[in-house]
Image: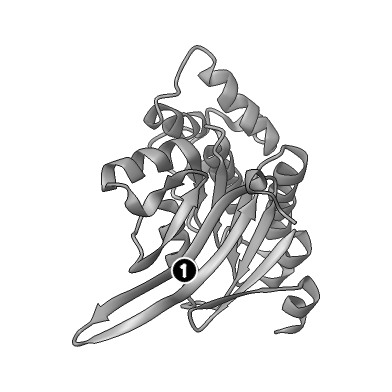
Amino acid sequence: MTSLSDRLLDVSGLSKSYLEGASERLVLSDVSFSVRRGELVVLLGRSGSGKSTLLNLISGMDVPTSGSVRFGDTDLTRMSDTDRTLFRRHALGIIFQSFNLIPTLTVRENILLPLELAGKKNGRTDEQALAVLQDVGLADRADTFPDRLSGGEQQRVAIARALAHDPLLVLADEPTGNLDFRTAATVMDILESLVHNRSRTMLIATHDRDIISLADRVFSLQGGLLTEVSAAEAAQDR
């Protein structure tokens, strides 16, 4: 049985609906689950299943219709927009499918940006940036601009940026969606290594079932409902 101290994230009774004209569309219905420290959790779902909506609620980018998102004693759903933004900058790292690197900044500058936004820039900041670049195998590209990198390299920079400020939880939204199979496998090996060898905690939303083998736990999101499934069950449901 998992102790409360092991649980980093608790999502309870989370629902989200949107008005579309005169009708209401329910995207998530009474979603509840937890993520333990040091886990790599995979959230499986087809396009349009609500994966990105769920990540937006967990990150505080959006607010639920009902339910709560808690990190220990911190309830994001009771915070103001400003406080949620500040919490996200300090406690969360986010990896996007489209990389979202700033083209006018070098690799090093892209990685330093979240440290600056979180108010964590200090005399060791450059050293921290180079350390996370070393983790993803790109320490020699620190002064390169993103357009000089391949798609796989850009995603590795995005991973380094998400880790630079030592977040409590890393959220990855389709992190291999824009990559070919071989490059995607390399990126997933890096993510798995960072979680299991560097004591990180990560929640990956994806439709890519090849990622299942790396997960500690797997959840399936269908029709707005979330259920935990075994890796074998998830792999068979193609």
In the rendered image, residue 135, in percent from the top left (x then y), is placed at 69, 35
In the rendered image, residue 3, in percent from the top left (x then y), is placed at 69, 49
* Quarter of the image where the C terminus is located: bottom right
Above or below 214: residue 166: above
Q: Amino acid at mark 1?
A: Gly
Which residue is nearer to you in this view: 89 or 136?
Answer: 89
Q: Residue at x 45, y 56 (%)?
A: 69
Q: Residue at x 47, y 32 (%)?
A: 106
Above or below 123: residue 135: below
In the rendered image, residue 20, in percent from the top left (x then y), is placed at 24, 82
In the rendered image, residue 128, in percent from the top left (x then y), is placed at 58, 24
Which residue is nearer to you in this view: 133 or 216?
Answer: 216
Which residue is nearer to you in this view: 148 or 192?
Answer: 192
Q: Is residue 146 left or right of residue 214?
A: left
Above or below 192: residue 219: below
Q: Residue at x 61, y 25 (%)?
A: 130
Q: Is residue 107 left or right of residue 86?
A: right
Would residue 122 be seen by someone viewing this image from the given angle? yes
* Quarter of the image where the N terminus is located: bottom right
Q: How many discs appear? A: 1
Please name the residue that numbered disc 1 is placed on. Answer: 13
Would residue 149 be seen by someone viewing this image from the given angle? no
Q: Residue at x 70, y 72 (%)?
A: 209
SS state under label 1: strand
Colouring rule applied to residues: one colour
Residue placed farthest to the left in the image? 22
